[in-house]
Structure formats: structure tokens, C-alpha cells
Image (tube, coloured by chain):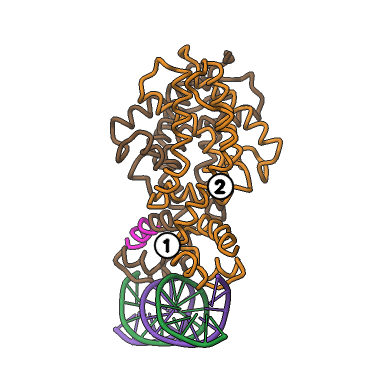
Chain colours: A orange, B brown, C purple, D green
Amino acid sequence: MASETILDVAIRQFGDRGFEGASTRAIAAAANTVMSSITYHFGGKEGLYLACADHIAAHLAERFAPIMAEIGSPADMDRQQATEATCALIEQIALLMMSDESRDWTNFLIREQQNPGPAFERLYSGIMHHMVELLRALIVRVRPELDASAIRALGIGIFGQALVLRAARATVIRVLDVSEIGETEKKLLLDQIRYNIKALLRSDPPS
Amino acid sequence: MASETILDVAIRQFGDRGFEGASTRAIAAAANTVMSSITYHFGGKEGLYLACADHIAAHLAERFAPIMAEIGSPADMDRQQATEATCALIEQIALLMMSDESRDWTNFLIREQQNPGPAFERLYSGIMHHMVELLRALIVRVRPELDASAIRALGIGIFGQALVLRAARATVIRVLDVSEIGETEKKLLLDQIRYNIKALLRSDPPS
DNA sequence: GTCTATACTACGATAGAC
DNA sequence: GTCTATCGTAGTATAGAC
């Protein structure tokens, strides 16, 4: 189906160049069709942008379905299990942030975070709030003594462990003194993230 | 001077809409001048973009000069002092990430991280590598037993604590269930960051 | 459904008046 | 230094052929 190809190309273009910077002609040409196909399938540039958001949400939901199913319900976990589940979840997010496959999705997502519009609404209610809620529930199991605000703030910090790998990608590559994030760097960063999360979830206070 | 106004407007526009999305006509109009002024002062759109990067680097250097002077040299610090200095540095970065004043700089910066070009080079060598190096040296003082790779990976995780506040801004606001990040939320997040950094810098391993 | 043709607007660069 | 005028290009939208 041509509209699938158009969506994939459009997500890349929008992610790289932003809504205004991307051109429907260029998107259509890269998808081996003409600009008016976009009008036909999506109603116009704006409609295409929103369809991209839905497409990303669907793909993310599909990608995280296995790990979320494996984690299951945090309600009947003990501390150790919830800690491990948190590590597993963030590890998956970190892998996403480092993957080339999802480079275009994450670029689109980060861009939309800076100027949230209707597309962010679709992304958030489509997939992100499920993950936010799961993370929150897991932290509650590990640190039941914390109040709701602290749980949320801690969750933000834990999520930052994965996000930094995409949002500051160029800096990460510079700091590691490599030309790209290869398998060696992936392993290094994932191991550190797992260690960091366990440190962040400890209940005995630092000196 | 008119070229100062043009730079401020341009940083906002480039940050919001990207290089291609921003228009020199719109930038000039918002700076109460005409498009050909940009040609005169900066040689064109590309020159303006690079000048924006230099402008941001200069402002960031100015903003962080006090805290970096106060921290001084990590070489003669003990663990406790280096831990406190790390907290102070990341706290300043976190404040920057949350500030409206620097919204445009950080948007520009994050955008440039996704597709680094000559402008990233100027930003990195202009200011960022100083901060990266300071953070690295501080962590070395706190955790001298770690090897160079682990120091770098830990630094990335610590930096992520601050970065997430800007890169996932829309999600942070959603999670905290507020319409903007006010004083209450700033305090909550900064307190958590300080706690988190101390947890991340602990040398006794988590269970 | 996919294409061509066209209308209209906006873009960046540049030359030249003042 | 700041402006107007203009050129060539590229943008979105739309109507209509097939």
C-alpha cells in the first residue's frame, strides 16, 4: 500500500526537518508518488502529520507489547521483582533510544515534546501514558513509603537515564569518543543504566 | 544594535521550527527590519544559523562562569566536596533546562544534537566540552576506583537527570499533572535530582 | 486511486537606490 | 546600514483527466 510508504518517509522527513521544514513534494517523491496522493490519502500536510503520530504510537505499542506483557501486573510483585521489572522496562526504552531502526520515531517524538500540539496528544494517549503508568506502579511497589509527588519525580529521573541517549546523542558520542554507538557502547551504557536504576531505587538514604 | 535583536529572534525561530522551517523574512520582520539585513550582517541564512550557535555558546559560558568559578579545581577535593560540587553543577543545568529564559537556547541545542552539523561543533567546543570535562573530573574524585569507561557512562546518566526536564518537557508536565513547571515543581524536581545524584555516586553497591 | 496542470503564496539571494 | 524591487525556485492546494 502506497500510504504506508508515504508514512514511513514522512516520519523521517518530519523528524529531521520539522513540520514546516519538510515538504510534501519531497515526501511524495521519496515515496515514489506525487504530492496529490498525500491530499488524497491524508487530506493535506496537517493530516499527514497527525497520521504519522498515530503510526508511531501503533508501532511503539507493538514494540513494547512483549515486555509489558512479560512484566504483567505490578500489584502482586515484591520489591525485588518490581526492581527487576523496572530495569527491564527502562532497558527496552534505552535500546529504543539507541536503535537506528527507531531513529525517525524518536526524532519525531522529541521534536513534538518541545512544541506539543495535537500530535503529542495522540502519542501520549496512544502509548506513552501506558508506560508512564506502568513505571509509576512499579516504583510504588519498590518504594511504598514515598508520597505520590516523590514517586513521580523519581520516575522522571529514572526515565532520564534512557532519554539522554537520544536527546543528547551527539554529546554522548563525543564523550565516549566514538563515531557511532556500537555494540561495545550499547553494553557499557545498558550495564550502567541497570546499576543506576538499582541505586536510584534504594531505600536506605545516601550519606 | 540591530544584529543582536536579529540573533535573539533567530534562535527562537530556529529552535521552534528548525533550520529549513524558519524563514529569514519572518525573522527579519519580528526583529523590525527587512530580510536583506540578514544578508548584510550574516551573509545569509546559513551564516545566521552559525552566528546563533556562537551566540548561545557565549551566553551559556557567561551563565555558567560563576558556578564553574565557585567549583574551581576538582583536583584538591575530597569525596564529599566533589559530591556536593556535582550536585551544584547539575542543579544549575537543571535550572537552565526548566527556565523560560533559556527555552530558546535549549530548543536550539537539542535540535542540533539530533542532526549535528557545523553549529554543533561550535557549541561543543565553545562551552559544552568544558562542562563535560568538569563533570568527569568531579566523578573521578568521588569514584576513583572506576575505570574511564564507567566514569563516562555514569556521567551520562547523571547528566540525564537534568536533560530529561527539557527533552521530555511535555511528558514531565503531564506526569506532574500541571499546566506548567512552577516554583513548587521546580523545588520538588531539584530536591529529587540532588537525592538521585547522591544515590548514583554511592560507592557501596546496591543489593 | 493516481496522475497532470495550474493558481497562488512564500522562500532565499541579490542588485542597487538612498 | 537600511531599504525596495525583482528573479528564480519551491511550497500547498485544488480541479479535473484517465
* Secondary structure that dominates the magenta span: helix
Residue A43 shown left or right of residue B177 in the figure:
right
Q: Which amino acid does label 2 sit on?
A: His
Q: Residue at x 32, y 61 (%)?
A: B1
Residue A46: which numbered mark, if any?
A: 1
In the rendered image, the quadrant that contains the C terminus of chain B is top right
Q: Which residue is drawn at 46% across and 50% down?
A: A111
**Residue B88 within the magenta-colored segment of the rendering:** no
- Residue B205 percent across, percent down from the top left: 59, 15
Query: What stretch of residues is rendered in magenta?
Result: B1-10
Q: What residue type is labelled 1?
A: Glu
| Mark 1 element type | helix
**Residue B6 within the magenta-colored segment of the rendering:** yes
Residue B100 shown left or right of residue A172 in the figure:
left
In this orientation, which residue lies closer to the viewer: B179 or B150?
Answer: B179
Q: In this view, does A93 lie above or below B32?
A: above
Residue B39: quarter of image: bottom left
Q: In this view, does A167 lie above or below B76?
A: below
Q: Which residue is drawn at 53% across and 42% down?
A: A61
- Residue A36 percent across, percent down from the top left: 50, 73
Residue A177: quarter of image: top right
Mark 2, residue position: A59
In this orientation, which residue lies closer to the viewer: B144 or A207?
Answer: A207
| Subunit under mark 2 | A
Mark 2 and mark 1 residues within 8 Å of each other at the beta carbon = no
